[in-house]
Every structure is written in C-alpha cells, then in structure tokens.
Image (cartoon, rainbow, N blue to C red):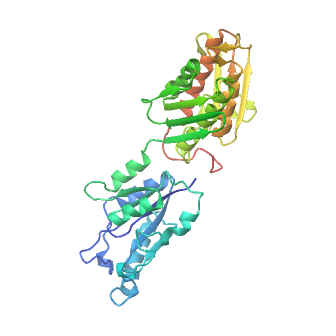
Amino acid sequence: MKKYLFIDRDGTLVAEPADEQVDSCDKVVFEPYVIPALLKLKDCGYTLVMVSNQDGLGTPSFPLETFNPAHRLIVDTLESQGVDFEQILICPHTKEDHCQCRKPELGLVMSYLKDLSWDREHSYFIGDRDSDVQMGANMGIGSLRYNRNELNWNAIAEKICGAHRTAVVERVTRETKIRIAVDLDDPSHSSFDTGMGFFDHMLDQIATHGGISIEAKVEGDLEVDEHHSIEDTGIALGEAILKALGDKRGIGRFGFVLPMDEVYAEVFQNRLNEDGVTAALDISGRPHCEFSFDGEFTRDHAGQMPAQMVPHFFESLAVAMGLTLHLKVSSGNCHHQIEALFKAFGRALRQALARNGHELPSSKGKL
C-alpha cells in the first residue's frame, strides 16, 4: 500500500520570514537537513505531497507575481536534488474567508481521503503549526510537529524510517474471537492465551526464534474441538505479520533456502532435538504451502493440540500472509516433531523479516 507524507511548506521545508510571506527569491532559506531527510524518506517508500496555506494569494496584498518566482525556486531546487511531490496543494484564502480548503480543513486533500487504497497507519502530516498537527488528526493519520531545535528533519527521518513494524488484527466469527498484536522489531513483550497450553508453547517458539513479539488472545469453541481456534489463529497471525511488514522494503524476504512455488531445493537440515526438520519460506505475495514428512506424526495429539492441525495452521498462516512456505520433518517423538517445525519456522521467519536498507527485494518491483 502507498504511504504518504503530507508536508507543510513555510516553516517546515523553508524558513518562514517575520512577515510570514515568502514573496521573493532572497527570502528562500531551506530548513537544515531537509533535502537528505526527504531523500531518505523517499527511499523508505514514501510519496510526498505539499500542503500549504498562502493567505491572500492572488490578491493585491500577495500577488502571484511575487509568489511564483520564490515558489518555483523552492520546487526546482528540491527536484534538482531528487525530491519531487505527487501534488502541490495550496489554499489561497485568509482565515476570514471561512473556506473549506484552509488547513486544518480537509478540502485540499479530499481526493486522498476518498481513496481507500493507501496506508493511513504509516502515513503522516508534517508541519510546524497547531493547524498542521490538527490536519493530520482530521485526516486520520499521524502528525509530526517540526521544530528545528527539537524534532528536526534528521530526527523525523529517523523516527519514521526506524519505526517499529507493528500491527494489531482482530478476527471475530461465530466460532472464535481473536486478537493478535505483533511487533517485528522488539521481541520483549509476547503473551499467549489460546486456551491450549501446548499451542501457547508453539506460538512462543515462533516469537522466540523469530525475534519478534506476538500477543495472542484467543476465545474459541473448544467445547466443540480445537480446529477453529488453531485455524483462525493462523489466519490472524498471518494477517498481522503482513500488515506490520507494510511495503516490505529492506526485508531479507527469504528464510533458509529459496522456494519457488512448488519447486523446493533443500540446502541443509536444521536439527532440533535430533529430529531432522527444514523450513523454507519466501515472503513473496504468492501463497503456497508444501508440508512433507520422512515419517508421520507418532501421536494424534501433543497436549490439547491435534497433530493433524499443525499443517493446517501453517497453511492458514501462509495463505493469509501471502507466504510461499515449505516445511519438512522426519519421524520421531511427536512433541519434538511439532516443536521442531515451529522453531524452524521461527528461524526462517527471522531471516526473512530482517531489514537491511530500504530496497524492495524483487526484480518485479512488487511483493
């Protein structure tokens, strides 16, 4: 999903003069670090939109003849350094005009608000005034108040690009009520309450070996059986990880080996508790799950968890996450077989989620 930064001009991109009008080229002074910060934010996958109030623009008090050269200098200078804007939106009215386009009113950005395809959770409004902060709130996105001495452009770029990848998914059906929260960059706050002790233990293996936090609260119809709770937890967990990944820039993408749909090249066996187990995954956007055995599960259950639900859990997660997943386990103790699979999946996931830079790891330009 597309991520946006809606950015004020005067006082944010360029210094605002005492008379609050940038009406000549000699008044154009860029804020410190603004260009390298905007380039970094673009590398992080953000699309830029300029949103500015220009009081009385086009009137005798602020004629276009004085506005245009300075504005053109600002835009041309930024573009020459690789900083471009999808749109430049300007309100020319004064406060007394009571228009619908003056920040923090929403008239200027109404076309964006009508478009439901972009990522509001990871988009921001950046400006130096109360009206900019309120504009972000009115749009339903985050707000960052620029201040040269406190939250400067370097700090803004670091805050946005280095932000934790988090998400919450709630899934409610007639059979289950599930809340999954994930943090892909902080492994310190996992908790599990599924009503099945062994399943809690397995989810903990994913979190621990994946280097992530998972908070799982599951209320299901266990009086019927465990199927719905395990299946729907897999779906919700897959959706939460996918949501937290955002545009997937910078991720490792592959875990352990490189699977390509139904084709699987085994590189090595990861041995856990002396049971041969391999997990290979690709955060590909192409859901596919292959589950194979050298033997069979040696018991029907591990604790309250039916062994036959293990492949179904991973398939549900893979489909929801858009994951190409290959899992293989040898014969042995049933507890060890299942635990080895969850541990190996976590280790593969850790490699695939790891960030290194901001490039999208796909020759297609999309995952």
Residue visible at 54% across and 36% down? 179
Query: Is residue 275 toward the left or the right of residue 97 in the image?
Result: right
Residue visible at 46% across and 56% down? 141
Query: Is residue 306 toward the left or the right of residue 163 in the image?
Result: right
Is residue 229 in view from this perspective? Answer: yes
Q: Relative to residue 294, is residue 287 depicted above or below?
A: below
Image label count: 0
Q: Residue furthest bottom?
A: 60
Q: Nearer the viewer, residue 279 or 55?
A: 55
Q: Whole-percent x and y of residue 137?
A: 42, 59
Query: Is residue 211 toward the left or the right of residue 290 in the image?
Result: left
Is residue 266 in view from this perspective? Answer: no
* Quadrant of the image occupied by residue 240: top right
Q: Relative to residue 286, is residue 217 depicted above or below?
A: above
Q: Whole-percent x and y of residue 346?
A: 56, 26
Q: Whole-percent x and y of residue 196?
A: 58, 21
Q: Residue furthest right?
A: 262
Q: Nearer the viewer, residue 188 or 279?
A: 188
Q: Nearer the viewer, residue 129 or 153?
A: 129
Q: Whole-percent x and y of residue 169?
A: 55, 41
* Quadrant of the image occupied by residue 264: top right
Q: Relative to residue 226, is residue 241 depicted above or below?
A: below
Residue visible at 57% across and 47% down? 360
Q: Relative to residue 110, is residue 147 depicted above or below?
A: above
* Quadrant of the image occupied by residue 332: top right
Q: Nearer the viewer, residue 107 or 290?
A: 107
